[in-house]
Amino acid sequence: MQPHAQTMHQLDSDAYYPPPLAYFFHAFPHLNITCHPVNSTFDPDSSIYLESLGILGSLPAAWLIFTLLVLLIYLLTRCCDRRPRPKHSIIVLKWTLAIFTLLCCAAIGIGLYGNDDVHNGLVQFILATQSMDDIITAVKNQTGTIETTLTHKVEPLLTELRDVFDNPVANQTAREMVFVALKAVTGNTTTALHSVQDISGQLKGVTLHGIVSVVQIAEGIRWPVTMAVLSILLVFCVVLLFGVARHSRCALITFSVFGLFAVIISWLLSSLYLATSVALGDLCMSPDGFLEREAVTTLKADILSYYIRCDQARTNPFFQRLLQGQRAVKAMSSNLATVARIAEALYKHADLHPKLDVLTTDINQVDKLASGLSTLLDCKSLHRQYLTATSSVCNLGLFGLSFMLAASVAAGFFFTVLVWVDSHTWIYIRRRRDYLQVDEQDPFLPPTAASQAIAARTLRSQGSYGSTSYFRQHHHSPHHHHHTPPPTPPYPGTLDGRSSREEKSQHSSHHESGLHSGGGSEHYGSSGASAMLGPNHGQYATLSKQCKTLESSDFY
């Protein structure tokens, strides 16, 4: 019971079965332009089949057009709305943007994962196809080597030996036996040559190098371009997250522009991936049938069917020709040994050698090459690579392509929502306004230059109340003590003709005389005004009497 189960498992592992995703995509309706169902068998040469794929791929494109129209109408209503925007809380909108942006990033990440699966599947397909092409090339090379050896080496040596055997000898009976054996060698050489030519002739137009080259070039372009496009979409998401986090009106407006490009890119990719997934699903339902239809002009159907199915109940189509050629080579070796044994007794050694030695070496080489052909022409090695190629495309490749399709559709919906919500959010973020001038003067700190200037203008508008009180105190003082400030010499290095130290001393003496001569409220007003106006009563010192007096208000 166990050996039977093991045999069944081995048979199952050597057979190809369509994956579930192939059934899923193959079940999509294939309709022509008149909405009539068409044959869903993969046939890239049929215009009707390609038309059905184009109709399926146009569905996401139609949704894209509808989405763009809706967004256009919405944005036009926003642009034409000139009403003032009241203060509005955008916390809910910002949280919505953040959540949908993270979901969009997750969808793009799934697309990157699917892109990597598709890349790995195509790499395995390229390697397996290259291995199959190497096997076919090895068969061609070995058959070509056998053909060259028999044509350019063995047959000329047989002709030279025939010329040697034409020389007269005493034993005519032995000579006839040599000619019979030599004729058998020549006949077997012709048989082996025809067998090899028949095998190589059926593989003459078979090559997979073109397929390998096309897939390598296409994948070398597709993979980096897809990575770049998905990375750009991620950058758009990062810009939006930055705008939400920093409350940046500029970043949100930037995304509302580039978000439209993201919507277009996502839905166009969805169209491409949907059509490709359906086509690949149709191919993976029956890759054997597609190859048999495509290779009918280059390879016989029985040969192709033998290698892609490798049914042990079927006979190798090259078996008869290969067996015939191997038997002919074996007979050549046996007949040549007979020729050498009889001819050694009839002819000189110099006439036979090294011709017989070289001929024996060449026939042995042909025998080895013919034995190696039996291994190369067996279906097991090539069928194993064929299963690897089909599994890499129909399992890993289709699986990754499904992820990319789902990711592009999800990203299209998410970007649509993000553009709509973002366009509704940034209009409530006002431009940054200028700072208002507010009085931040601390009553416990010394007055600033600005406050001094304001106080000076106020006092001048009131008739210089502080200075009038000061002179009134000195005029009515019982001591009649008058203080006259000294003249200002025109020296450019000092203010009002004195250094700062002398100015401080004069201001101190002036203040003391005010304390001795004044009193009451007038004294308070005079001292307060002096404190606010400074040592020069709110005016800057001049260099000479003829110069215009610069007031502090001229600088503020």
Image: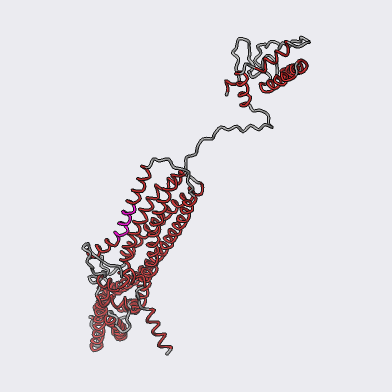
Work out whether 389 lies above or below 450. Answer: below
Q: Is residue 268 visible?
A: yes
Give the percent coordinates (x, y) of residue 303. 27, 76
Q: Is residue 62 magenta?
A: yes
Residue 374 is situated, as x and y percent measured from the top left of the image, at: 33, 79
| 385 relative position to 305: left or right | right
Quadrant of the rendering where the N terminus is positioned: bottom left
Front-lying residue, 494 or 341: 494
Q: Residue furthest left?
A: 34
Residue 42 is drawn in which quadrant? Answer: bottom left
Dominant secondary structure (helix, strand or loop) of the stretch shown in magenta: helix
- Hey, which quadrant is residue 531 in on the image? top right
How is colour applied across the structure in the image? secondary structure
Q: Is residue 544 above or below residue 290?
A: above
The residue drawn where x is 22% and y is 62% is: 33
How many marks are shown on the rendered structure? Answer: 0
Q: What quarter of the picture does the C terminus occupy?
A: top right
Is residue 300 on the magenta stretch?
no
Provide residue 289's location: percent of width, then percent of height. Answer: 27, 73
Residue closer to the observer: 213 or 201: 213
The answer to whether residue 49 is above or below residue 415 is below
Is residue 365 visible in the rendered image? The answer is no
Magenta-highlighted residues? 57-67
* x and y, in percent, of residue 83 in the image: 40, 41
186 left or right of 501 in image: left
From the viewer's side, name the closer residue of 457 and 45. Answer: 457
